[in-house]
Image (cartoon, rainbow, N blue to C red):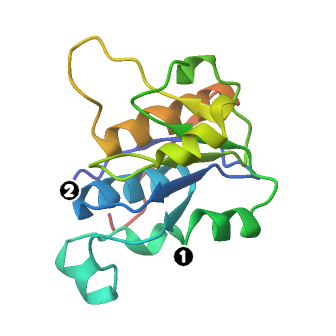
Amino acid sequence: MPTGPKLRAERRDEPFRIVLVDPEIPGNTGAAARTAAATESALHLVGRLGFRIDEQSVRRAGLDYWHLVDLHRHDDLASFRVAHPDARLHLFSSAATKSYLDVEFRPGDALVFGKESTGLDRALLEAHPDAVVGIPTLGAVRSLNLSNAVAIVVYEALRQTGALQRTYVEAPSLGS
């Protein structure tokens, strides 16, 4: 494991909310959790999970950073909305006509991603057409991998809100 200095950015007062609705693939959720921990974003798992996240399962998967994740569980998106009524929703879909690059992100926004197989429910997208955004692709793939999409969007939101403007190098701690 590399033990040199680490490039860091200053902490923010209000985190972004990464919201995964009905995630199906544990590896994607694990990678999104790592992005959440690295960016101090809250991870909200909504609905039915296609895997277990109990301590034994997480340890078996080798997720040694899981304790760093600000993790929240919600039965459904309505429950998330009750818990975070002021969070602006950005609904990510491969069927979007608006690019994430055209969104003006604000701290506290909810970045909502659907399950790997089918994405977010069509009814949800139709109910919030102005909130539906996507990540443009150049090739003919159907969509990007869920965890890659999360990372792309979170880092763009951080960049836009100035969270990455002031970086510093953290010296390695003694004993690392």
Location of mark 2 (residue): 1
Q: How many badges with numbers are in the image?
A: 2
* One can see residue 19 in this view: yes
**Residue 174: quadrant of the picture:** bottom left
For residue 6, side relative to residue 26 (left or right):
right
Q: x and y percent of residue 152 in the render?
A: 43, 32
* One can see residue 166 in this view: no
- The quarter of the image holding the C terminus is bottom left
**Residue 101: quadrant of the picture:** top right
The residue at 67%/49% (across/down) is: 11
The crowd level at tag 1 (other Cα within 10 Å; few <14, some 14-19, many 20+) is few
The residue at 72%/49% (across/down) is: 108
Q: x and y percent of residue 48 in the render?
A: 40, 72
Closer-to-camera residue (70/119): 119
Q: Nearer the viewer, mark 2 or mark 1?
A: 1
**Which element is circle 1 on?**
loop
Mark 2 or 1, nearer chain start: 2
Work out which residue is located at the far right of the displayed protein and give it: 86
For residue 116, side relative to residue 39 (left or right):
left
Q: Amino acid at mark 1?
A: Asp
- The quarter of the image holding the N terminus is bottom left
Q: x and y percent of residue 7 in the render?
A: 46, 39
Location of mark 1 (residue): 75
Q: Amino acid at mark 2?
A: Met
Does residue 163 sit above or below 112 in this rendering? above
Q: Are marks 2 and 1 in contact (CB under 8 Å)?
A: no
Q: x and y percent of residue 167 in the render?
A: 59, 33
**Residue 135: quadrant of the picture:** top left
Alpha-carbon span between mark 2 and mark 1: 37 Å
**Which element is circle 2 on?**
loop
